[in-house]
Amino acid sequence: MRPLLRFAAIGTAVTIGLLVAGSWWTRNAPAGTHEAMGWACAVVFAGSLVGAVPLVLGPGGPAGAGVGPEGVSRFLAAMLVRMGAVAVGAGAVIFLGEVRVESFLLWLAVSYLAFLIVDTAFALRVFRSL
């Protein structure tokens, strides 16, 4: 459980960094862009947290599958869970219609890529701890 809390702390820092940098980049953007950016970062952060669960709490305990074929399957399952959670969250936000869709999709892609780096580094750290 401790690695998941550490991952949540790092994810929070990355989210804050994205929001600060994004606020500067979009200082002259149309109304609604900042809200779309916030929603996109929140959706990706939540998806990233949900995707980290199979790595930490999967069958066999924390990273119990090792780095063999089962470990690779666990990593791919984590990425699939992450992508599914982000797709469902993004669909919900778009369906609610409260954000600028163009800005939301742009920031969804940017934050997804940023968290892809964080998620991959976390998975490598989990597998190295075996």
Image: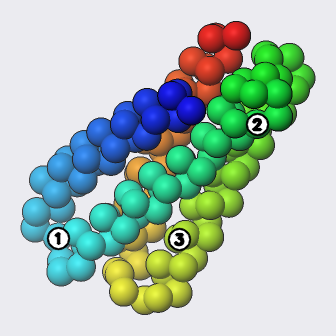
In this rendered view, identify the residue nearer to me: 19 or 29. Answer: 19
In the rendering, which numbered label is found on residue 123?
A: none
**Residue lying at 34% horizontally and 44% vertically, measured from the top left:** 12
In percent of the image, x 57 and y 76: which residue is there? 91
Instruction: Name above or below for residue 35 compared with residue 110.
Output: below
Q: Quadrant of residue 26?
A: bottom left
Q: Earlier in the sequence, mark 1 or mark 2?
A: 1
Image coordinates of residue 27 in percent, x first then y, are 10, 63
Q: Nearer the viewer, residue 45 or 40?
A: 45
| Image quarter of residue 74 | top right
Q: Secondary structure at mark 1?
A: loop
Residue 70 or 27: which is nearer the viewer?
Answer: 70
Colour approach in the figure: rainbow
What's the amino acid at mark 1? Ala
In the rendered structure, which disc, 2 or 3, sits on the residue that comes first in sequence?
A: 2
Residue 127 visible? The answer is yes
In three-dimensional space, the C-alpha distance between marks 1 and 2, rounded to whole angstroms, equals 43 Å
Query: Disc 2 and disc 3: Cα gap in Å?
Result: 25 Å
Mark 2 element type: loop
Q: Which residue is mark 3?
A: 90
For label 1, count other residues whose C-alpha is less than 10 Å away and answer few (under 14), some (14-19) or many (20+): few
Q: Are marks 3 and 1 in contact (CB under 8 Å)?
A: no
Name the amino acid type tagged 3. Ala
Secondary structure of the residue carrying tag 3 is helix
Q: CA distance from mark 3 to mark 1?
A: 21 Å
Q: Which residue is denoted by mark 1 in the rendering?
A: 29
| Residue shown at the point (36%, 86%) measured from the top left | 98
Q: Amino acid at mark 2?
A: Gly
Q: Can residue 71 be seen here? A: no
User: Label 2, on which residue?
Assistant: 58
Q: Residue at left 60%, top 40%?
A: 52
